[in-house]
Amino acid sequence: MTAASEPARGAGVTAGSRGHRGDARAKTSAAATFALVFGVAGLFSVLTAILAWLGLVLGIIGIILGIVGLKMARRPGVTGRGVSIGGLVLSILAVLIGLGLAAGITTFVNNENAVNRLQTQVDKLRDKLD
């Protein structure tokens, strides 16, 4: 065939259907996506302070998945490096805040004067309710 008889490149193909021909599009790593999900869930759990232990566990899982996602993003045809980094950052924040809360609570509970002050405040509030 001559160049004049061939259709122009992209002729007859709409803009929306170009990406659907074959698997030429890169796919986001599942590990990267899950790292981001676990990072967000871990951070929200830690910030509630009641579920800090759950946020700590979710943060650790998110860190592992973030590292796996970064390694998978190096493969050809796989994206998700930014998503992995985001998940890693959020997961690390969740773990650090969770450890900080655990250390603060442990220090507070082991301080007898602080516990006595708290008990005094609770007793005063209880007396006001009666």
Image: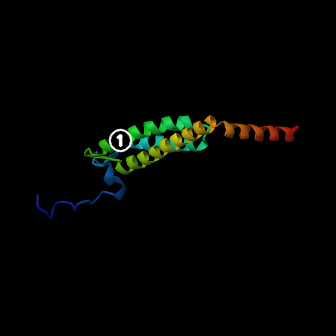
Q: Position of residue 27 (x, y in %)?
A: 33, 45
- Left or right placement of residue 95 versus residue 30 in this view: right
Is residue 51 visible in this depiction of the protein? Answer: no
Amino acid at pointer 1: Ile
Q: How is the image coloured?
A: rainbow
**Quadrant of the frame with the C terminus:** top right
Q: Nearer the viewer, residue 69 or 26?
A: 69
Residue tagged by mark 1?
67
Residue at far bottom of view: 4
> How many numbered marks have been drawn onto this rendered protein structure?
1
Residue ID at (13%, 63%): 3
Q: Secondary structure at mark 1?
A: helix
Mark 1 Cα shell of 10 Å, populated few (<14), some (14-19), many (≥20): some
Left-right relation of 19 to 34: left
Q: Residue furthest right?
A: 130
12 to 107, vertically: above or below: below
Q: Quadrant of the N terminus?
A: bottom left
Where is residue 43 drawn, in percent x and y? 52, 44
Q: Position of residue 28 (x, y in %)?
A: 36, 45
As drawn, which residue projects farthest toward the left?
A: 2
Residue 75 visible from this viewpoint:
yes
13 is higher (above) or lower (below) than 71: below
Quarter of the figure with residue 106: top right
**In the depicted view, which residue is nearer to us: 50 or 102?**
102
Q: Residue at x 48, y 46 (%)?
A: 93
Residue at 29%, 45% in the rendered image: 23
Image coords of residue 35 (percent x, y): 42, 42
Residue 108 position (above or below residue 82): above
